[in-house]
Image (tube, rainbow, N blue to C red):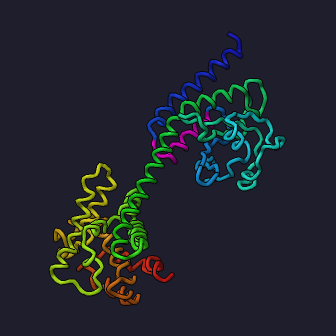
């Protein structure tokens, strides 16, 4: 066996080991950010590039974007820009020895990142319908290629990156579909939340503010990032049960009679019953918030009369956000309260209606949270 043959065997073994190490992780990954990290690292290792990234097509904005590129943050470029844009438009790979000698090169990424691109590989990533959904791009070959050229990608490098793209395409397409489904679920949740506000002659701004304030409180409590996001997404559904309350009660400008108040209080159970049988964990989480956000720390709330930590934490957080917005905003039955009166009410209800520690967090970050009502 010649020295060249031995070198090829060693290189083939290296490629196989990389594929066996990365492909199970890529196939199992559904979170786009993590998936792009894995794919960028694999591509860079396969062709021994200085940088490697996966550009995805954003149909809505008409742009190409990469969430992960080694050493830089998210980048966005026009759909038809540069080598990546060329591969998107034509479906053709590119093997470039000197980027600055090619008129298709878009220098804006270099200018933004203060980087110097020389050699480039681009490989289209094809979806199941045969369309281009993204482009693998490797930049600046490290060391020598098979022909002994330094800093230049070879045909073999192009073939290897193409093989990597084929292996990874299905997983990327699945992740993109999952992103679309999650975005659709978020939009549906927000729309359903707005339904209750439109029925009560209020605006969707209320549910947006409740979601934002709940999210801020959760962050200030230093809850895990995924829990903060769940709270942000689920709290817009807190008053969904209002769809089951008669208009005459829901929009009454004066005080409720005892019977009317009894009917009004059923909205928390109605919302829970609409959501808790869902197969979606997020909607079941929203069901708990809908049922618990009118409970009180002292046990005098409704519908279950729960007290203290019997009340789900998300419900306790939503309760503060909901009351803050109700007091600080105009309603059909009242004008907004002055800021100091709102603040005093929360201090008064510390340990009564609201968990003391949550009121303390609200007070500590009052200016930042209340800025929603000073705009």
State which quadrant residue 314 falls in.
bottom left
Q: Is residue 355 left or right of residue 21?
A: left
Q: Residue at x 44, y 53 (%)?
A: 184
From the image, give the main secondary structure of the stretch colored magenta. Answer: helix
Q: Is residue 83 visible?
A: yes
Q: Position of residue 182 (x, y in %)?
A: 43, 51
State which quadrant residue 365 falls in.
bottom left
Q: Residue at x 29, y 64 (%)?
A: 289
Q: In the rendered picture of this protein, how many numbered marks are placed on residues?
A: 0
Is the N terminus in the top left, top right, bottom left or bottom right quadrant?
A: top right
| Residue in the foreground of this view, choosing between 199 and 64 | 199
- The residue range painted magenta reads 30-45
Q: Is residue 344 left or right of residue 301?
A: right
Q: Is residue 293 left or right of residue 192?
A: left
Q: Position of residue 7 (x, y in %)?
A: 67, 19
Q: Position of residue 188 (x, y in %)?
A: 40, 58
Residue 273 falls inside the magenta stretch = no
| Residue in the foreground of this view, choosing between 195 and 28 | 195
Q: Residue at x 68, y 15 (%)?
A: 5
Q: Residue at x 69, y 33 (%)?
A: 93
Q: Is residue 73 visible?
A: no
């Amino acid at each position: 066996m010649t020295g060249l043959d031995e070198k090829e065997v060693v290189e083939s073994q290296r490629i196989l080991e990389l594929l066996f190490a990365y492909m199970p992780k890529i196939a199992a990954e559904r979170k786009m950010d993590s998936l792009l990290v894995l794919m960028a690292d694999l591509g860079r290792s396969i062709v021994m590039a200085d940088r490697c990234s996966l550009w995805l097509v954003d149909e809505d904005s008409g742009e190409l974007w990469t969430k992960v590129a080694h050493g830089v943050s998210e980048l966005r470029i026009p759909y038809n820009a540069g080598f990546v844009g060329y591969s998107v438009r034509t479906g053709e790979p590119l093997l470039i020895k000197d980027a600055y000698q090619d008129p298709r090169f878009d220098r804006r990424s270099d200018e933004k990142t203060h980087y110097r691109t020389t050699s480039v590989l681009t490989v289209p990533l094809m979806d199941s319908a045969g369309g281009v959904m993204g482009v693998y791009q490797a930049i600046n070959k490290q060391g020598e290629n098979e022909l002994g050229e330094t800093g230049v990608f070879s045909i073999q490098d192009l073939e290897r990156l193409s093989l990597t793209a084929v292996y990874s395409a299905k997983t990327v397409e699945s992740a993109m579909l999952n992103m679309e489904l999650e975005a659709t679920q978020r939009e549906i949740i927000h729309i359903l939340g707005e339904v209750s506000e439109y029925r009560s002659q209020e605006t969707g701004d209320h549910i947006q503010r409740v979601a934002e304030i709940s999210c801020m409180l959760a962050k200030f409590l230093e809850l895990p990032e995924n829990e903060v996001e769940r709270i942000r997404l689920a709290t817009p559904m807190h008053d969904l049960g209002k769809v089951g309350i008669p208009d005459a009660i829901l929009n009454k400008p004066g005080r409720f009679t005892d019977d009317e108040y009894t009917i009004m209080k059923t909205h928390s159970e109605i919302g829970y019953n609409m959501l808790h049988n869902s197969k979606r964990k997020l909607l079941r989480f929203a069901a708990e918030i809908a049922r618990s956000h009118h409970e009180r720390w002292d046990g005098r709330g409704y519908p279950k009369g729960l007290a203290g930590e019997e009340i789900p934490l998300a419900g306790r957080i939503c309760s503060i956000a909901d009351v803050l917005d109700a007091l600080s905003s105009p309603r059909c039955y009242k004008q907004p309260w002055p800021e100091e009166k709102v603040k005093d009410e929360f201090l008064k209800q510390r340990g009564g209606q609201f968990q003391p520690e949550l009121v303390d967090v609200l007070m500590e970050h009052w200016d930042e949270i209340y800025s929603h009502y000073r705009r």
